[in-house]
Amino acid sequence: MKHVTRRITVGALSAVVVGTMAGVTTWALAAETPAELPVRLIVGTKLGADTAAPLRTVSTMGVRTLDTAGPAQQAMASLRAHTLEVSAARSAKVIAALRSDPAVAYVEVDRVRKVSDVTPDDPMYTEGHQGEINQVRLPAAWETTTGDAVKIAVLDTGVAKVGDLTGAVTGGWNYVSNNSNTTDDAGHGTTVASIIAARGDNGAGMAGGCWSCVILPVKVLDRNGNGYDSVIAKGIVYAADQGAKIINMSLGGPEYSKALSDAVAYANRKGVLVVAAAGNAGNTASRNTKMYPAALTDVVAVGATAKGSDARASFSSYNKSGDSWVDMAAPGVITGMDRYGVYHTDQSGTSFAAPMVAGAAGLIKTVHPAYTGWSLQLSLLSSARPIGSWNKFGMLDAAKALTIATDVTPPAITGMAPRAGSLNRATITVTPHGVADGGSRISKVNLYADGVYKAQSFTAPYTLKYNSAGRNGTVKLQLRVYDKAGNETRYDRSIVVDNGLPAVKITSAPKNKAKVKGTVRIKATASDANGVRRVELLINGKVKSQDTSSPYAFSFTASKQPNPMKVQIRATDNAGNVRLDTARTYTR
């Protein structure tokens, strides 16, 4: 996966930079110190004032007037302004004199602006070893943002906190050894992390995609680069629970895994973007074989392009005709840093294309903090530059990706069961009606009771269960429907909950253990705050008759019943709660 053509240690690189800067400093001192460089000023005049007045004010102070003729002078005249130049030594007095002139509206330093693309001063970039950065338009993206403290999980061999990753790596977890030691014992994970978040424009090393992003190291691969699906799945869940907004997995293999699929779905539901390498089977018979986790739903699968080219790298897995599991591409022959702080050029593999996408996603998340993983994915894919049918969307365009709008239309819900004001008890089945979303699609439906979370469903018809045990009276149910872009719609409904048992009592009947004959008559009372549905006569556990109106009266022929006979009266209220009066045993 890795082809090293050049190594530059941090120490050697620093020596080169220091030597070069020493030469520049010597040259500058021989010519002129920075303090002797002239200061340019822009002076604006007030509306209606004599525009020549400021020039007269400083005419004897050694000031040179610029833009005295031609289009430059005409443009400044339209702005009612002048450009002046004065020595640094005299600039303070000149500025004070101009600001005291009643004709002057403002005085400001004529500042220097840079080209729109941010150019980092990291030697690996300035010396031409990171051409991949320009290829995906990262400098243009950096003009908008160089990142923020977006947490990006690197599920790999660990990450070393060295070189350009110093201060960029937070605590993580090692699922290979089940401890907190996330030291990189192979080197792969550190290289991946450096591509994502190497600190740029610091005069040393290289520039990663997101200079201020935070790396969460999750070690799921051993020193040989191998890891079980169960270990990787745990790492995905951990990263999502730890607040990672983006997960990078530069790992994979053939054959679907339900555990990985469930773990990715878990992360997706938490709004996390998952990025994975498409694989390096391009030169084998498995060149089009789906690799996992890359081929899972809602994972951005990244293929690799050749060095300095939009052409597919020969090693990259790719889509066969009619297939679309490889989503997009990024440069696959890149510069990265290893676990010892050594910088390598021509690192090859889709393992190194994926983190270029993850780093760009960190920039998008910085500009659009509310974007979910789905929205980040939309931004990446819809902005990609078409480069061929071997991947679905095309080459990463980091600058354009920052400009993509997301779905802002809330999902629909038209109703829910149970009906408003209905009487309920125990475990209540709650089902939303008319749930739909035409944009990012439904992500989940959550159920709350009186503002307290109770249940969640991810699949239609989104049936949820609410255990109302211990509750009596009015309960406000609320369904919160979310789409994958994070939009939310709420639907409220109040119901009545009755978990209290009805009262029931025999008021007239033979005494317990009495001998009975002929027609036996029993009377009872029953009551409940929400009404009694029915009262029943049970003999030896079987219903013999029922009454639905008070007073409740029953009778039976003793000779037709078993001997002995266990007689009970059972009341059921309108919510379905049941209570039995004390049993009486009769004999014939």
Image: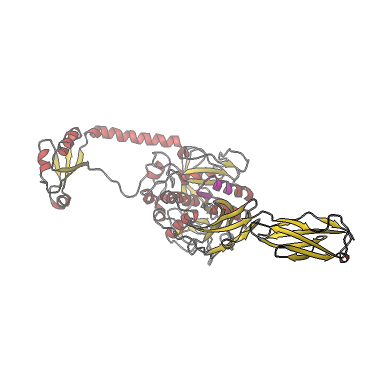
Residue 155, how many percent across, how many down? 55, 47
Please, which colouring scheme is shown? Answer: secondary structure
Can residue 345 be seen at all in this image of the molecule? no
Which image quadrant is residue 290 in? bottom right
Q: Can residue 524 be found in the magenta stretch?
A: no
Residue 339, how many percent across, how many down? 52, 39
User: What residue is drawn where x is 28% and y is 46%?
Assistant: 113
Q: As displayed, is residue 199 above or below residue 464?
A: above
In the image, taking residue 86 as reference, residue 335 lies left or right, namely: right
Q: Quadrant of the C terminus?
A: bottom right
Residue 183, how many percent across, how many down? 56, 38
Nearer to the camera, 256 or 514: 514
User: What residue is drawn where x is 10% and y is 36%?
Assistant: 60
Q: As displayed, is residue 321 above or below residue 153?
A: below
Magenta residues span 235-255
Can residue 406 be seen at all in this image of the molecule? yes
